[in-house]
Image (cartoon, rainbow, N blue to C red):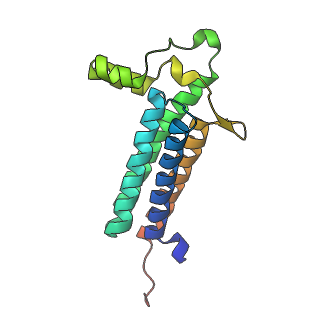
Amino acid sequence: MSTLLAPRALFLAMALASAGLMAFALYLEYVYLLDPCPLCMMQRIWVVIVGVLALGAALHGRGLARWALATGAAAIIGSGFSLRQLWLQSLPADEVPACGPGLDYMLEVFPLSDVLKAMVMGTGNCAEVTWTFLSLSIPAWVLLAFAAFLAGSALAHRGARAPLAPWA
């Protein structure tokens, strides 16, 4: 197996990609002053979870097939939030849910159950397209990242399950 496709190398690449995604998200938030909506925060959480799992796999080195399954599951869950936000962005203006207060305000004032519901279901704020690159919005790019994480997890799982060569 090529060293580039070795499971630990794939996990390290996924961890670095996750860190890069989070750095860019923080750049957009603090330099371009784009406030993340509740669904954006959920996608960030799952990008971090994928990154932490991938880093754990790269450092631990044992049970890589299980790490690959966990990383892949986290990528699938995160992609669900990306798809939800893309669906909200595709709705006609009259069907978009009502906008809610900012996440910081919700965390200070609302009960945790209401905040979690807003983070899972999204609000009208999540339907706004505030930034695009190559005609794709932020959740579309995050969905592509989750798809890449899933592909990397599948390759890592395959590599972890492959029999070792007799000379290895």
- Corner quadrant of residue 89: top right
Q: Check the image and name the residue furthest to the bottom.
A: 167
Of all residues, the one furthest to the front in this rendering is 31
117 to the left or right of 99: left
Instruction: Please state the horizontal and vertical placement of residue 81, each as a whole percent of the image.
Output: 48, 33
Q: Is residue 127 above or below residue 168?
A: above
Identity of the residue drawn at 58% across and 35% down = 32
Vertical side of 47 occupied by 35: above or below:
above
- Residue 117 in view of the camera: no
Residue 136 falls in image quadrant: top right
Q: Which residue in the rendered view is the most extreme toward the top?
A: 94
**For this rendering, which residue is in front, 141 or 104?**
104
| Looking at the image, residue 93 lies above or below residue 30 | above
Where residue 159 appears, as percent x and y from the top left, is 47, 69
At horizontal 48% and vertical 47% (from top left) the residue drawn is 22
| Furthest-right residue in this view | 134
Which residue is found at the position 46% from the left and 53% from the top? Answer: 19
Does residue 103 show up? Answer: yes
Residue at the image position 32 percent from the left and 66 percent from the top: 63
